Image (spheres, rainbow, N blue to C red):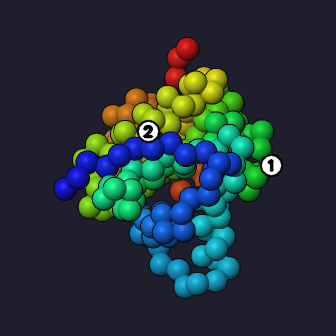
């Protein structure tokens, strides 16, 4: 199987090809482990965890593509600026609550998902390294991700240089803020 090429894209630039966006959305919903019927609940879930990162500005999409750019192996969506300072993240209470200070210290943040066939092949780590390099060059002191306490992906993030910085309860579930310093 071909090693995917990793490419950084600014959504404020040329639009993602519809075929690539369709694949990103398919990976997104598969990775969520949730099943939605088309409608407002599905649309809101997509917007909260994917769509708001495709708006431009300092947002970034990092794609892993194979088959000459035709197949999305995985994606990372992220923002360089702290979610505490952005109104579009006001609906995610932990950013302005339990994790506000940490989100300012580690302002860049991301969401990452891979297609099942490309997992455990180093693609995710390459996506994160590409984003981290871009965030550092853009002046971010650190990057963070928030996930559930004890989930399998915590070990992946730790292997990528993230460290648990704090935990909290959100919607009745324990979550962890993992931060990575980007240095100068």
Residue bearing mark 1 = 87
Tell me how far mark 1 sits from mark 2, CA to CA.
25 Å
| Viewer-side residue, 118 vs 84 | 118
Please report the residue visible at 34 percent of the width from the left and 56 percent of the height from the top. Answer: 68
Label 2 crowd bin: few (<14), some (14–19), many (20+), radius 10 Å: many
Q: Position of residue 169 (x, y in %)?
A: 59, 50
Q: Position of residue 110 (x, y in %)?
A: 54, 45
Residue 99 seen anywhere in this rendered image of the structure: no
Which picture quadrant has residue 81?
Answer: top right
Label 1 crowd bin: few (<14), some (14–19), many (20+), radius 10 Å: few
Q: Secondary structure at mark 2?
A: helix
Q: Secondary structure at mark 1?
A: helix
> In this rendering, would 65 be left or right of 11?
left
| Viewer-side residue, 109 vs 151 | 109
Q: Position of residue 65 (x, y in %)?
A: 37, 53
Farthest-out residue, top: 184
| Viewer-side residue, 12 vs 41 | 12
Please report the residue visible at 39 percent of the width from the left and 50 percent of the height from the top. Answer: 64
Looking at the picture, does residue 104 appear above or below residue 113? above
Q: Sequence-wise, which precedes: disc 1 or disc 2? A: 1
Q: Position of residue 85 (x, y in %)?
A: 78, 39
Identify the image quadrant of the C terminus: top right
Looking at the picture, does residue 136 appear above or below residue 125? above
Residue bearing mark 2 = 128
Identify the image quadrant of the N terminus: bottom left
Please report the residue visible at 48 percent of the width from the left and 69 percent of the height from the top. Answer: 19
> In this rendering, would 161 be left or right of 101?
left
């Amino acid at each position: 199987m071909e090693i995917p090429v990793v490419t950084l894209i600014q959504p404020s630039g040329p639009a993602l090809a519809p075929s690539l966006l369709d694949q990103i959305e398919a990976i997104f919903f598969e990775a969520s482990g949730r099943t939605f019927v088309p409608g407002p609940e599905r649309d809101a879930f997509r917007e909260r965890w994917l769509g708001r990162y495709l708006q431009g500005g300092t947002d970034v999409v990092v794609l892993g593509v194979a088959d000459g750019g035709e197949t999305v192996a995985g994606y990372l969506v992220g923002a360089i600026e702290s979610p505490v300072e952005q109104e579009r993240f006001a609906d995610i209470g932990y950013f302005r609550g339990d994790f506000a200070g940490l989100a300012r210290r580690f302002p860049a943040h991301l969401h990452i998902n891979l297609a099942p066939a490309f997992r455990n092949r180093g693609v995710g780590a390459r996506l994160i390294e590409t984003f981290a390099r871009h965030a550092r060059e853009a002046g971010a002191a650190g990057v963070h991700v928030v996930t559930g306490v004890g989930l399998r992906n915590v070990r992946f993030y730790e292997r990528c240089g993230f460290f648990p910085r704090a935990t909290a309860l959100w919607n009745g579930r324990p979550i962890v803020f993992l931060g990575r310093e980007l240095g100068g």
